[in-house]
Amino acid sequence: MISIKNNSEIAKMRESNRIVGLLLHKLDGFIKPGISTYDIDRFADELIRNEAGKAAFKGYTVPGLPPFPAAVCSSANSCIVHGIPSKKKILSEGDIIGIDVGVYKNGFYGDAARTYQVGNISEEAIALMAVTREALRRGISQARDGARVGDISHAIGSYVMDQGYFVADSLTGHGIGTSLHEDPIVPNIGTKGKGPRLKKGMTIAIEPMVNIGTNRVIENGWEFYVADGSLSAHFEHTILITENEAELLTEY
């Protein structure tokens, strides 16, 4: 069931998503060669607690897997999403790393992701990140009252393919509110004019995950990897559907 938020609920959504955006902004100055993904997770967990929020991903469950053990997903290079932070995963010059974070506060969730460069990175990685960021912008530009989910999906997928990249198979955006994942599913490839109709007051997370070499993915527990080992990037915003342009709830 797709939920429509009232003004009070939207205010709570803005607060949980404000914390998400604040964290992703502050990580820009924290991520550097030599730190571990565990260090990133500790930084995130402390900031979320200082803002009176709760790390939404920690303890999250899906059938067949143990509860997710960390505050953030930290997915480097060919890891697409859901990378588990570890003291053994040390960032090196030239890496790229996607950080996905969720926050729960006052009964509502926030969710966003951003891919960061670690020191100086290759032109290939720079181009991938730029295409993924632009794909997100194009998807958001289609999100308004009366449009369809397929309008968002088509804007993302057609642009990514036109640029010679690949949308990761079976990984999608989603509705968000009192649950971290709600209806509707928001695919990163689709057909204009198809799918659920968007309505004012809906909140959705749009999140293109773009690979260089193939759309195929390999699952290893929680973690998803590009099947050919090529690079992947991930950008995500939670947005509010309005009568005009969508409102970004997770500015970073």
Image (tube, rainbow, N blue to C red):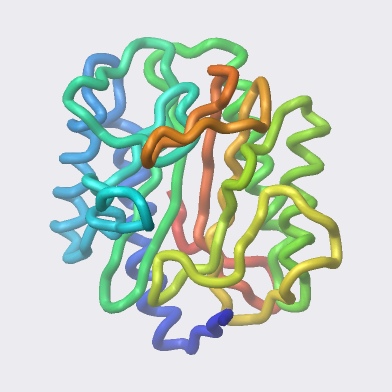
Q: Residue at x 22, y 24 (%)?
A: 36
Residue shown at the point (56%, 81%) measured from the top left? 1
Closer-to-camera residue (35/68): 68
Residue in front for this viewpoint, 170 or 179: 170
Residue 69 x, y percent position in the rendering: 22, 46
**Of all residues shown, which one is farthest toward the front?**
64
Near-viewer residue (106 or 166): 166
In the rendered image, which quarter is residue 210 located in? Answer: top right
Picture residue at 39% right of the left edge, 76% below the top: 178
Left or right of 41? Residue 154 is: right
Residue nearest the observer in this picture, 98 or 20: 98
Q: Which residue is drawn at the image coordinates 77% and 50% (left, top)?
A: 155
- Please identify the quarter of the rendering in which residue 61 is found: bottom left
Q: Measured from the top left, where is residue 97 in percent x and y? A: 41, 28
Q: Is residue 240 above or below residue 94?
A: below
Q: Is residue 49 left or right of residue 106?
A: left
